[in-house]
Image (cartoon, helix red, strand yellow):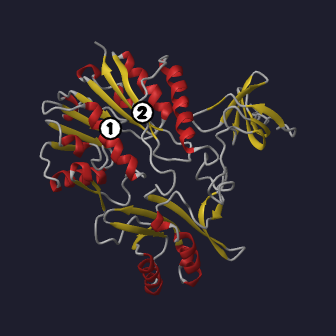
Amino acid sequence: MARFFKPQKKQLSQEKQIFTIDSMNHEGLGVTRHNKKVVFVEGALTGETVLAKQLSNKSKFEKFQTVKVLEPSAFRVTPFCQHYEQCGGCQLQHLDAEQQVQEKQTAVNKLFEKFTEVSNLPWQKPLTSEPVHYRRSGRIAVIYDKQKDQFLVGYRQKQSKKIINISQCDVLLKPWQAVFSSVRSILPQLKGGDSISHLQLCSVESGNYLIVRHTKALKDSDIKQLQTMCLEHQWQLVLNSDKGLFDSQETPYYLLDDYQLKLFFGFDNFIQVNADVNKTMIKQALNWLNLTKEDTVLDLFCGVGNFTLPLATQCKNVVGVEGVASAIALAKHNAQENQLANAAFYCQDLTENIKTQDWFNREYSVLLLDPSRMGAFDILTQLKLKRFSRVLYVACDPVTMARDSKLLINAGFKVSKISLMNMFPNTSHIETMALFEKEN
């Protein structure tokens, strides 16, 4: 009878190590080498010398955490948040805001060199916003701790599933600064407070919505208390049960003023977190594409029409495709509400075989991609890329974007413009826009 043995984990060194950091990677970690292996150091910046303790020891790399900064970088700053050392929400508050952009850009350079062997990328001016009070949406955990008989309202702790109490979060828009303390104080007064699992925040032109998600039906008296709290802060209360049903009587919307557009969306639909960067992102996309009334555009991963509808104001026609049915329903509604008859929408899982779809086989001059972190590899391997004169790739993951870029370069495109979009200041998240144009 065969016997199977679990491989033993390598023993972690208890001895702290001193490292001088060479660079930072796309996850915001300091990078150096030790014992012929790559070493990643949390909390360390380029050029710093730090004392660090070991967190993991793998065959090809080791991971450490900064214990003490021995020689600090000129760009090291004091974090503005009192919860920064415990909270897992932000990773780069200890780095100057402008330098965050430079480090992210350098990390993208290295990924492109690795995947495509392209160096000297044609970087354009980065799209930025204020480093604080930029998040118009967010998710807050609510947990009742039976042992301590108290409610925890906050975010996950760094490298843990534990929830820590948050007093305020300065990356959220100002209308939400009191949400943690207000909800925490009212929860013990509710009969069904322990059935509230988390909160969703959403601030758009139609209002500031506090979505309360709960696992059991709330008593009328509980709802009344929540409504009173929301009225005090000018929030609109929305209840959402574990069955996914919202009680909101209206559909929220946001505005794209430059194009006089109103976009409706559902609370379960994706919208960009940073409204300021979203608007400049759309404006830059249309400027780079330089559309004419002869252009036909294919917009993949279109959501509720965030790019599709602005595109429709400047081209002959545009087709938007998205895998989420509720988003496509709203995209169609948005086109109708904004009187854009040249925008058509289709619901399709873009990871599947799509070569038989009617929209797939039409002629297009421009392709726009705005995929999730998984990237667009599956769809790019199916598309006849040579039919497009320009491809605009909007990425929320630099690794999958660099990987997918190789397909475009192999198909005869070159990167003509690229810019960093700092959608999430003070975090390690990297959002990028790149324009690919046909060689010759």
Badge 1 is on which residue? Answer: 284
Badge 2 is on which residue? Answer: 419
Q: Residue at x 31, y 22 (%)?
A: 437
Q: Residue 41: where, in percent of width, then height?
A: 71, 37
- Name the N-terminal-most of marks 2 and 1: 1
In the figure, residue 3 lies in which quadrant? top right
In the image: residue 339, left or right of residue 17: left
Q: Residue 388: where, in percent of width, then height?
A: 25, 24
In the figure, residue 185 lies in which quadrant? bottom right
Q: Residue 155: where, in percent of width, then height?
A: 59, 60
How far apart marks 2 and 1 lie (CA) works out to 10 Å
> Is residue 149 positioned above or below 312 on the image?
below
The quadrant of the image that shows the C terminus is: top left
Disc 2 residue type (three-letter): Ser
In contact (CB < 8 Å): disc 2 and disc 1 = yes
Disc 1 residue type (three-letter): Gln
In the image: residue 122, left or right of residue 59: left
In the image: residue 190, left or right of residue 433: right
